[in-house]
Image (cartoon, rainbow, N blue to C red):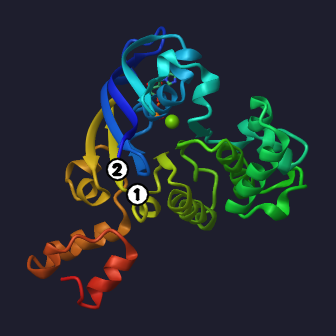
Amino acid sequence: MADILRVEGLSFRYPDSPKSAVSDFELSIPEGEIVVLAGPSGCGKSTLLRAVNGLIPHMYGGEYSGDVLVAGSSVKSSNMRDLAQTVGFLFQNPENQIFMFSVERDVAFGLENLGVPREEMRARVDEALRLLRIGDLAQRAPHELSDGQKQRVALAGVLAMRPKLVILDEPTSLLDPKTASELVALVAKLRGELGTTFVVVEHRLDLLVEVADRLVVMDGGRKVLEGTPMDVLFDNEAEAHGVAIPAVAKVQRLLAEREAGKAAAAKLLTPSALALAVEGRLT
Ligand SMILES: Nc1ncnc2c1ncn2[C@@H]1O[C@H](COP(=O)(O)OP(=O)(O)O)[C@@H](O)[C@H]1O
Ligand SMILES: [Mg+2]
């Protein structure tokens, strides 16, 4: 399948900054994947995302080299309006993207800006509300909602634009564990129903490893590891780059240290895999 995102030798340095925030970055993402981007604070994750949604170089000055292609078009030579129809972006704090009088109008906001005809707007807003299971909130004022509900409203507004690629920058950071795991389940559902590609910056890897196809680890502006979550998280370097290893993988390591035979052979990442191993079905 065609790559929805290609990052080709991207380097970017903010003005007045002594070093590049992103250096010599290469990445190819086929359509329909769920990709998690991890790495220590300040390693350049948000900067990379800005180079995908076009804020870099369109809104930020700085030294830019290399290229980013979204659905085959170069971000630096696309305009923001066209890009916004291919790339949806969910900010870390949903307060930054909800502001209107009702949930429904909020979700319609991007479509109104594009001048989408009324009928179609209605259909797309209803679909987004349904997908996020917030139809019952349609007439509510966004500022009265919980953080988890606001996050859904903001995501509904993004999805109503029907972007091929959705970027989420630390989407669970304001959410309690239950709402966070609901959001992760929702990402998997949307990928299944709409074929949307997701790039998610996330620290709660224990949640994301259940649904991610690929894990990319950055450090110091560079890509240091890339592969399936299994391959990356069982690479001894991952922890050295500040990646939080899921609890189940740690349990497996302890087992392996104690009993070098059977347990060491099994790679376990998720609670369900651990349960199977305990039942003796995986070793
Ligand atoms: N608007 C900005 N102006 C100047 N420097 C910035 C700006 N945003 C981020 N940086 C710097 O770029 C580097 C990468 O930051 P960022 O992409 O926000 O990392 P992360 O999202 O991984 O925490 C850091 O050194 C940070 O201080
Ligand atoms: Mg960031």
State the mark number for residue 37. none
- Residue depicted at x 84% and y 50%: 104
**Residue 66 visible in rendering:** yes
Q: Quadrant of residue 157?
A: top right
Residue 84 image position (x, y, % from top left): 62, 31
Q: Is residue 227 above or below residue 95?
A: below
Q: Is residue 167 above or below residue 69?
A: below
Q: Is residue 276 above or below residue 240?
A: below
Which residue ends up furthest to the left in the rendered image? 261
Kind of residue at badge 2: Leu
SS state under label 2: strand
- Residue depicted at x 42% and y 27%: 69
Q: Is mark 1 within 8 Å of ligand 1?
A: no
Residue 228 image position (x, y, % from top left): 29, 55
Question: Would residue 224 appear left or right of 22 to someone viewing this image?
Answer: left
**Residue 242 visible in rendering:** no
Relative to the observer, which residue lies in front, 62 or 188? 188
Position of the C terminus, as image quadrant, is bottom left
State the mark number for residue 215. 2
Kind of residue at badge 1: Ala
Mark 1, residue position? 212
Residue 150 image position (x, y, % from top left): 74, 51
Question: Are discs 2 and 1 less than 8 Å apart at CB?
Answer: yes
- Residue depicted at x 54% and y 30%: 53
Residue 282 image position (x, y, % from top left): 23, 83
Q: Crowding near pointer 1: few (<14 within 10 Å), some, many (20+)?
A: many
C-alpha span from label 2 to label 1: 7 Å
SS state under label 1: loop
Question: Would residue 262 appear left or right of 6 to someone viewing this image?
Answer: left
Q: Crowding near pointer 2: few (<14 within 10 Å), some, many (20+)?
A: many
